[in-house]
Amino acid sequence: MALDIKICGLKTDLSLEAALASGASHVGFIFFARSPRNIEPVEAGRLRQAALGRARAVAVTVDADDRLLDHIVASMAPDMLQLHGGETPERVATVKARYGLPVVKALAIREAADLGAIEPYRGIADRFLFDAKPPAGSELPGGNGVSFDWRLLAGLDAGVDYMLSGGLNAANIGDAIRFANPPGIDVSSGVESAAGVKDVALIDNFFRAVRAATSNRAA
């Protein structure tokens, strides 16, 4: 099975094209005012046109209400919704029913016990995203450039579909793939030259490192 690769927090035509040309399976747009990667729904809708037929466009929100989600879905027409806040299983189910779109539920991981949060969402969320718990004082639930012990995922039930996130970059993605063997990976700050500024060269380097790591995994 091919490894899914999501480049998240895209804001420009140049960075989006770099992600698509490199082979991203998913491209993410963040709708969270406190994030340096925040984008307006109408602009995301313009950008996502380039992804049609090439990658799945993901709308990332944090405890968004129906009004904001309505605006995002109407303006952008995403392929998937990613809920990156404290959304309950009931809220996830409501969002799925309202928009008829697959929903990814992000969960913050620091230790093995945190994986217990998966259970209430099973059969509701279509996929999980495992991100590192944010450092003290951070206002962002993700995109903080910190990671967790990927070995925690090695014994995960094979039926749990997820993307690995948190502090990934070209230098460490080989270890992440070797230790966790994830079905998907998600990178944001690891391909940036500054907070919220995607770097085309770093995107290219990341994909080169992923290809090398997956070749080694296959061997």
Image: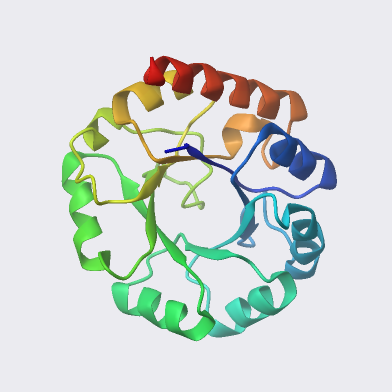
* Residue 172 shows in this picture: no
Which quarter of the rendered picture does the N terminus lie within?
top left
| The quadrant where residue 47 appears | bottom right
* Left or right: residue 23 compared with residue 6: right
**Residue drawn at 61 percent across, 78 percent down:** 68
* Left or right: residue 70 compared with residue 166: right
Please tell me whether residue 66 is drawn above or below residue 6 in the rendered image.
Answer: below
Foreground: 83 or 158? 158
* Residue 174 shows in this picture: yes
| The quadrant where residue 109 appears | top left
**Residue drawn at 79 percent across, 69 percent down:** 42
Image location of residue 200, percent across then percent down? 76, 29
Please tell me whether residue 199 is drawn above or below residue 5 in the rendered image.
Answer: above
Tell me, what colour scheme is on the image? Answer: rainbow
**Residue drawn at 39 percent across, 26 percent down:** 177
Image location of residue 149, percent across then percent down? 29, 30
Image location of residue 196, percent across then percent down? 69, 42
Which quarter of the rendered picture does the C terminus lie within?
top left
Image location of residue 199, percent across then percent down? 74, 30
Foreground: 111 or 139? 111
* Left or right: residue 208 compared with residue 87: right
Foreground: 159 or 178? 159
Number of callouts: 0
**Residue drawn at 45 percent across, 66 percent down:** 103
